[in-house]
Amino acid sequence: MRAAAATRLRTDPATRAAEKLGAARRVTVITGAGVSAASGIPTFRGAGGLWKNHRPESLATAAAFARDPVTVWEWYAWRRQRIAEATPNAAHAVLARWSQRFEAFTLVTQNVDGLHEQAGTKNVVRFHGSIWRLRCTRRCGAPEWEDRNAAQRTLPRCETCGAVARPGVVWFGEEIPSEAVQAAFDALDCDVCLVAGTSSVVTPAAGLVGEARRRGAYAIEINPEATPVTGGVDLAIAGRAEEVLVEIEKRLSVKG
Ligand SMILES: NC(=O)c1ccc[n+]([C@@H]2O[C@H](COP(=O)([O-])OP(=O)(O)OC[C@H]3O[C@@H](n4cnc5c(N)ncnc54)[C@H](O)[C@@H]3O)[C@@H](O)[C@H]2O)c1
Ligand SMILES: [Zn+2]
């Protein structure tokens, strides 16, 4: 009986993850839309990802915006409204605590919702910008600005030159800000690299965990579904981030 229980404990993935994290000094976490799912923000792919029968890939591009800025802004207004009503969930809370716990901690997120920051996470690298930032489409030189007006009905405009403004996010086909790429790649020299809630199909974010592992990190994935990186990590935990992270944290806390 005791032996069986011990075996079960040893093979419990949350315990394994806690052991690795307990011994880690440098931890890097990569997150995607799945981490915000429990806050009521729909993921892009999978159930709930569609908006008025549009696929996100057909809205989140510069070409779509040039063609039909009103529809693209309507979609963003809808998302901004959902996000404005959302609060961080248990996954955000655990990661915020971990950002204080380890000697070095970096969280690279593809999410534009700002919930990691709202939860108090230190050292967040925003790979895809922020849905609360706007920029001038004419590039008149006005710096990007903050706009928290979730329910705007008309096309927002640049206050300096009057041109239509666009969301300060990275669209498909656009470059990730170079400082974010640099910060993310610097953080891949770590002891544990944990990727949670991303379908890992959008590069370069999808390649980060593999690169961390090549550099010697222990790689963990948390996702209820298999992804292209599942076969390439040391530990794949099939489950929801808001549940699995809490389980890992409990086991970490027991060890002090
Ligand atoms: N700019 C845009 O508007 C836009 C639109 C579409 C996609 N994208 C980009 O594509 C990027 C990559 O997409 P993504 O991977 O973040 O989202 P995604 O929607 O592609 O994938 C979400 C993943 O989360 C998983 N998941 C669902 N619930 C979960 C839970 N409770 N816990 C853990 N995992 C859960 C799903 O299995 C899925 O693998 C996005 O972050 C975004 O930047 C951008
Ligand atoms: Zn302007």
Image (cartoon, rainbow, N blue to C red):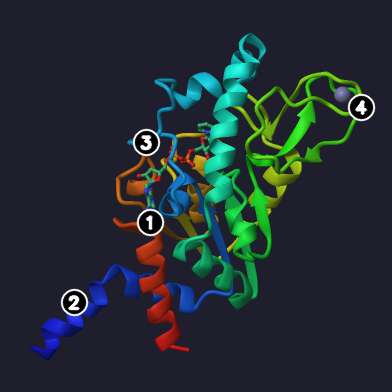
Q: Amino acid at mark 1?
A: Ile
The residue at which mark 1 appears reads as 222
* Residue at x 19% of width, y 84% of height: 6
- For the point 70% across and 40% down, the residue is 149
Q: Which residue is mark 4?
A: 160
SS at mark 3 in the image:
loop
- How far is mark 4 from mark 1, CA to CA? 44 Å
Q: Earlier in the sequence, mark 1 or mark 2?
A: 2
Mark found first going from the N terminus, 4 or 2? 2
Q: Nearer the viewer, mark 1 or mark 2?
A: 1
Please report whichever mark, 3 or 2, sits nearer to the chain's N-terminal start.
2
Query: Cα distance, mark 1 to mark 2?
Result: 20 Å
* Camera-side mark, 4 or 1: 4
Q: Residue at x 34, y 48 (%)?
A: 230
Q: Which mark is residue 8?
A: 2
Residue 168 visible (yes or no): yes
Quarter of the rendered image showing ligand 1: top left
Three-letter amino acid code at the position of disc 4: Thr
| Mark 4–mark 2 distance (CA, rounded to whole Å) | 63 Å
The residue wearing badge 3 is 48
Q: Earlier along the polypeptide chain: callout 3 or callout 4?
A: 3
Residue 134 occupies quadrant? top right
Q: Are marks 1 and 3 in contact (CB under 8 Å)?
A: no
Label 1 within 8 A of ligand 1 by Cβ: yes
- Identify the mark at residue 5; answer none if there is no mark: none
In terms of depth relative to the viewer, which is nearer, 140 or 189? Answer: 140
